[in-house]
Image (cartoon, rainbow, N blue to C red):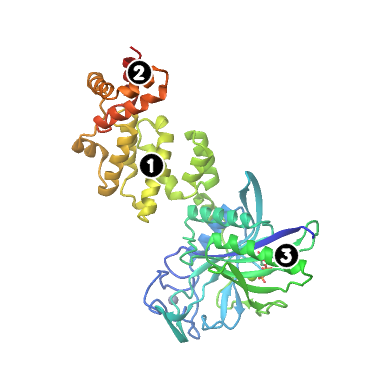
Amino acid sequence: MSKYETVVGLEVHMQINTKSKVFCECSTQFGLEPNSNTCVICSSQPGAIPILNKKAVEAIVKTGLALNFDINKQCTFARKQYFYPDVAKNYQITQLDMPLCSRGKLTITIDGKEKVINITRIHLEEDAGKLVHEIGSRKLDYSLLDLNRAGIGLMELVTEPELRSPDEAFEFLNELQNIVEYLGTSECSMEEGKMRCDVNVSIRPVGQREFGTRVEIKNMNSISGVRDAIAYEVERQKEVFNSGGKLVQETRLWEAKEGITKSMRSKEGALDYRYFPEPDLVPFDLPDSFIEDLHKQVPELPKARKARFIKDYNLSEYDADYLTSVKMVADYYEEALNASKDKKSSTKLLANWISTELSAKLNASKTCITKSPVSSQNLTKLISLILDGTISGKIAKIVFEEMYEKSSDPQKIIKEKGLTQISDESTIIKICQEAIFENPKAVAEFKSGKERAIGAIVGLVMKKSKGQANPQLVNKILIEKLKD
Ligand code: ADP
Ligand code: MG
Ligand code: ZN
């Protein structure tokens, strides 16, 4: 049985993050009453003239610049003819020979090694409306048409067939999503359908240069779904080959619940869309200054920010990765750090609190970090109270609970609840003496050489002090007393 290599190319559609649609003034707002958000242009009335949204072009060029694309200064549009029940004019305005962006790159990290994936193009096109086949749980025996989504700007990004495994595709999409989120050019959430992906998969015997016949899996709506679908499809194709069968070029659908792909339609020979230049949109040139201005607006991207976090804040690879993969989390971290008086000693502790305590709370209440009840300033205050010994790490967790519930200041909570750490030696000595007196068994064990027995006595001191005794001091004093 020969060994096979997996070949994957992705076509990713991302909704452009603009206030209005790409060729009219209707809003891009989601979830409005069906067909309430339409006009003569996006509902395809005969004779209506499209007007290009400059912000949509900006978003695509900015995305292209961030991904090292060549920007084509000449901007032209084409009509793609097709029978679209969800686009009443029966053609889609898109770009053909001259996409806004050509030949880009994105670097992914696989097993600790970097790999550059070439991206063929990014072009601008309009989204279609939505066919509705059910209302609530009631299945209709007819279809309804909602045109609210029709005419929303999309950027379509097409990769070269250079991805070689389900994991590479998964990494590519995650990295792309992170970068686009940093740029703010699309909200690119797959769950809300703001990012959709067609996955092209084929296999070939290792060593063979020509590509095998590909299958296209349409409209995937989760990144882990893409990974699963590729893994399934590769196994299916191997089976076809190994049983002497022949693959056909076809479109398949991913059935997430069953974990399988199903044939939707075969695609023998390319469809002829009869593209021609869109006569209602005059070609024009993008001025150099337009592109230069956008270049300046490209922010520091996730990879660069991660490297800086490791270098400047002395963070581990893991922490830096966690903090920078979502821009809002990285912003929160740096805001907190900038508010700190002792930046240097706060870096790691702050990273820990964000990646454990805070993220657990936010996840549980499905809250975005920008709406965190614990502000970055308040988290910084809590960290400095731990660092200066006012409270122990344990008490800090109790304080944090309260901070999260009531969005309040840690100092106020500590004062109200009397949670300040006890660092007064004479008070601690008294409690230690009590604990030693009450735990003769542990004392005897300790004295006979079982050093770990001290844990029981420390525990008792912490209990008696309601967790407020300074743990370092308790340890020091107990050892002194027990070694007497
Ligand atoms: P279409 O518009 O018909 O889908 P394209 O030529 O634009 O065709 O290719 C779409 C995607 O398919 C690209 O991402 C490309 O990298 C990928 N692709 C092309 N050939 C193969 C193949 N043999 N195996 C896997 N992916 C492929
Ligand atoms: Mg395709
Ligand atoms: Zn409109």
Which numbered disc covers residue 479? Answer: 2
Q: Which residue is mark 1?
A: 335
Instruction: Quote the CA–CA distance across marks 3 and 2.
Output: 67 Å
Q: Are marks 1 and 2 in contact (CB under 8 Å)?
A: no
Mark on residue 238? Answer: 3
The quadrant where residue 13 appears: bottom right
Q: Is residue 425 left or right of residue 111?
A: left
Describe residue 273's horizontal placement relative to residue 281 as left or right. right
- Secondary structure, mark 3, is helix
Residue type at tag 3: Lys
Q: Residues within 10 Å of mark 2 (few under 14, many from 20)?
A: few
Please state the horizontal and vertical placement of residue 79, each as a whole percent of the image: 60, 77
Residue 262 in the image, given as x and y percentages of width and height: 62, 74
Residue 146 lies left or right of residue 101; in this view the side is: left
Please tell me whether residue 404 is drawn above or below residue 149 in the rendered image.
above
Q: Secondary structure at mark 1?
A: helix
Location of the C terminus (image quadrant): top left
